[in-house]
Amino acid sequence: MVWQPEIDELNQRKELAYKLGGEERVQKHLDNGKLTIRDRIATLADENSFRERGVLAGKATYEDNELVDFRPSNYVMGLGKINGRRVSIGGDDFTVRGGAADGAVGDKKTHQERMALELRIPIVRLVDGTGGGGSVKTIEDIGRTYLPGGPGFWETANDAMEQVPVVAAAMGSVAGIGAARVAVSHFSVIVKGTGQVFTAGPPVVERGLGMWVNKEDLGGAEIHAHGSGVCDNEATDELDAFEQIRIFLSYLPSSSWELPPHESTDDSPTRRDEELLSIIPRERRQPHIIRKLIKHIIDHDSFFEIGKFFGRSVVTCLGRIDGFPVAIIANDPMVVGGSLDTPGSEKMLKFIDLADTFNLPIINLVDQPGFMIGVEAEKAGVIKAGVRALQAIYQCSVPWATVVLRRAYGVAGAGHQNHSNSRWPYRISWPSGDWGSLPIEGGVMAAYRRDIEAADDPESYRQQIEDKLNLLRSPFRTAESFNIEDIVDPRDTRPLLAEWVQDAYRVLRISTLGPKGRGMRA
Amino acid sequence: MTDVKAEWPGVISEIKVSVGDTVTEDQEIIILESMKMLTPILSPAAGTVAEIAVEQGQYVDEGTTLAKLD
């Protein structure tokens, strides 16, 4: 009992910290439909798994050396478990100075990131705060202005992006460095209605641009999960955000030095779904439903889409085959015909880097008419964004499987895998395979313009050439010359990929893992 | 009033509803041919077709209003 008084004081101090910004501010926070940071962490992490670090940090007020008041630091963080696996979790306490940095004591944010890097475990950031410098009130407090820097954060942020999974949730109005902490991540989710992300909020926008806009229209889920690509996914509420974080992490290893975790499944690796035989329409101009197709191939209930509403001509999702996590890229013919446009290229680039960083084998399901064409696409810089995506393909070194479902055209279509002599990507095609530099329909006019224009009946002559070339279009002719290595029954796709994924994981197991050296930008 | 817009350029291949028709959410309103693909443009909400703003065979730019729903 020697140290009992100190233990009593420890407990008293913890109780004060648990009060966060005080009853009134906490109630207001709850009334806004938000959980407190402590409840957020408790809800996200496995039960009783959270081990806080720095609970005693805060601003204390003493009277006659007696502690009379305590305002806890507004960043709560520590170690916890998600699905039984160790993670670091931290988040802003909005009830103390709006989560702004001037309410922080000690650099707990950077501490969390360093801890995660040292332990090689994921970083979960529950962001609900504004800028790094806090408010301009800081100027009054310190009696001077300051040149902004923030070296601590960027140093760890860059290391984290190539070493451990970084997950961020925008759970309130998030500005400045808070917004940056959401954006510089492998997976970000914004809570619909209560989460907003912006470089600066409405008052600053009004002063700087003379424009009044409410915070939801400025940086809500509609902006950032449905167009800008700043947030990968939107969540219907905070619980949904936590569920998405848990699911995302379930596909990833704890660090880039490890393999993604295998999960047992009752779904047979040799399952052959009949639907696959008819899923691609015979009429070339008819689209198909790509998400349905993917689900016929991967394990039941293992579909987790990233960035559904951004760059929609490309679908990127995590899934499992025979229990092994894989990263799946597919083209969606329902959106700009499945062509690769600027947002689609950006999404694809980040997804490939993610898979490569965390040793996830990649499956590319190709139905690609080429880069998007036209004035708007050119203005959006499609070729620049596109070549960056292709560079990612040629940089990535994880096992890669290509299934040509239908079209593979042009430079974008050629980029369905790394064709370097040093690589052997597994490649198969369905009988619907249809490929070339240019599609015959448009290409005929470009290649035979002179002959067509000189003909007595140009239109019928053009048709004649098209018909002649179409007779040569069968993918079996391509297979004769071993230009496509195999054409398979679509129903065999899952069984074949289940064998491939075993090979892929064996190769990864005997490879030297760790950061790839190219770094990873958000 | 809800506008149904073209999200990318293309040619109106087929108009599948008429003014006065009741439509459900995600019902096919128009088929837009773009990148040699016949893409269904779906109704963003349930309602009644108040106006069809385009004709079959017409080229439309990205952002063009194709139809209006009440």
Image (cartoon, grey):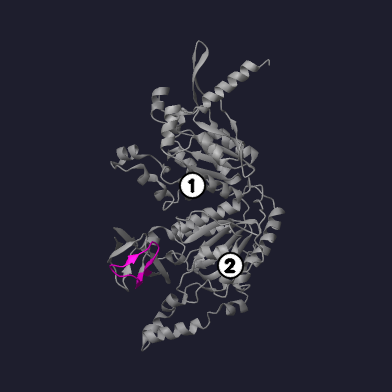
Secondary structure under the numbered disc 2 in the rendered image:
strand
Find the residue positioned furthest to the front: B22
The amino acid type of the residue labelled 1 equals Val
Dot label at residue A189: 1
Residue B54: percent from the left, percent from the top? 29, 68
Locate residue A289, reporting x and y percent. Answer: 49, 66
User: Residue at coordinates 57% horizontally, 70% vertically from top-left?
Assistant: A276
Looking at the image, is mark 2 or mark 1 earlier in the sequence? 1
Asked whether residue A248 is drawn in magenta, I would say: no
* Above or below for A399 versus A470: above
Chain ID at mark 1 = A
Looking at numbered disc 2 in the image, what kind of residue is underneath it?
Answer: Val
Residue B30 part of the magenta segment? yes
SS assignment at label 1: strand
Residue at 47% x, 34% y is A149
Pick the front one: A283 or A10: A10
Q: From this view, report whether residue A274 is shown above or below residue A29.
A: below
Q: Are the residues under badges 2 and 1 in a single subunit?
A: yes
> Dot 2, crowdedness within 10 Å: few (<14), some or many (≥20)?
many
Residue at 66% across / 53% down in the picture?
A263
Task: Tell me the magenta residue range.
Answer: B11-31
Q: Which residue does the numbered mark 2 point to in the structure image?
A: A403
